Amino acid sequence: MFYSPFWSIFIRSEPVLRETAMLGSLAFGALSSFWVTLTFLLSGAPYHYSSDIIGLFGLLGVAGALMALGVGKLCDIINPRIITGVALLLSLAGFVIAWVGGQFLPALVAAVILLDLGTQAVQISSQNRIYSLKSEAGSRLNTVYMVRYFAGGSIGSFLGVNGWSWLGWNGVGMVGVGMLALALVVYALDLNRSRWRNRTK
């Protein structure tokens, strides 16, 4: 007799895990598509930056991550799901800025900060929701989430490189904005399902 692995069981039985895994994978996928192709953009016109200068952009990502440190405390005050929604909007805004203003350094700086802040906030708020489900299975639930999360990052990297090969920076913008827009659609659909379930209880 075939027994499904634990991750499959949790994905089927935990709607919150399904939602957070999907949202996290899409958010991280968009971020990965950005970072994996940013070198291509910065090494070409109009920037022509060296690898050393391009590497300094990673420090901007650290700034966004540090700004997200307070998200954990906010989750104690505000519904973590609301924080996830706001974080996805921040990430989307960051990618739109990067796409439209990719030829302008201030726009790229703002985009890096917003994207890293938004993705980190999605991660923190999602894990907060996961650990509130079943305390005795918290580590296994988080394992399922992280597998999906990094799978999304791999897919985003693949799509980002192919987007660049296809249409340059416009292709990357289409990939990133598309993934984040899909995340917001999933978020809205799951919100409606939650409201329907609450009304029928």
Image (cartoon, rainbow, N blue to C red):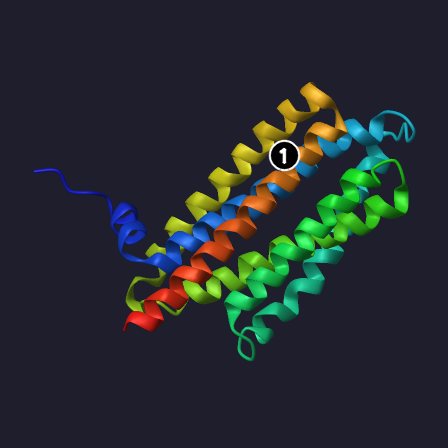
Question: Which quadrant of the structure image shows residue 159?
Answer: top right
The count of marks equals: 1
Can residue 114 be seen in the rendering of this structure?
A: yes
Give the residue displayed 33% in from the left and 55% down from the top: 140
Q: Position of residue 12 (x, y in %)?
A: 28, 51
Q: Quick check: 178 above or below 123?
A: above
- Position of residue 123 in the picture relative to residue 147 (left or right): right
- Position of residue 39 in the picture relative to residue 21 (left or right): right
Q: Nearer the viewer, residue 55 or 166?
A: 166
Label 1, on which residue?
175
Q: Nearer the viewer, residue 32 or 179?
A: 179
Q: Quick check: 58 above or below 103?
A: below
- Position of residue 97 in the picture relative to residue 122 (left or right): right
Label 1: element kind = helix
Q: Residue furthest left?
A: 1
Q: Position of residue 177 (x, y in %)?
A: 65, 41
Q: Nearer the viewer, residue 16 or 8?
A: 16
Give the residue displayed 52% in from the left and 73% down from the top: 79
Can residue 59 be seen in the rendering of this structure?
A: no
Q: Residue furthest bottom?
A: 77
Q: Position of residue 15 (x, y in %)?
A: 35, 57
Identify residue type, mark 1: Val
| Mark 1 surroundings: few (<14), some (14-19) or many (≥20) residues within 10 A | many
Q: Quick check: 192 above or below 116?
A: below
Q: Position of residue 201 (x, y in %)?
A: 27, 73
Give the residue displayed 57% in from the left and 28% down from the top: 158
Give the residue displayed 43% in from the left and 57% down from the top: 190
The quarter of the rendered structure image containing the N terminus is top left
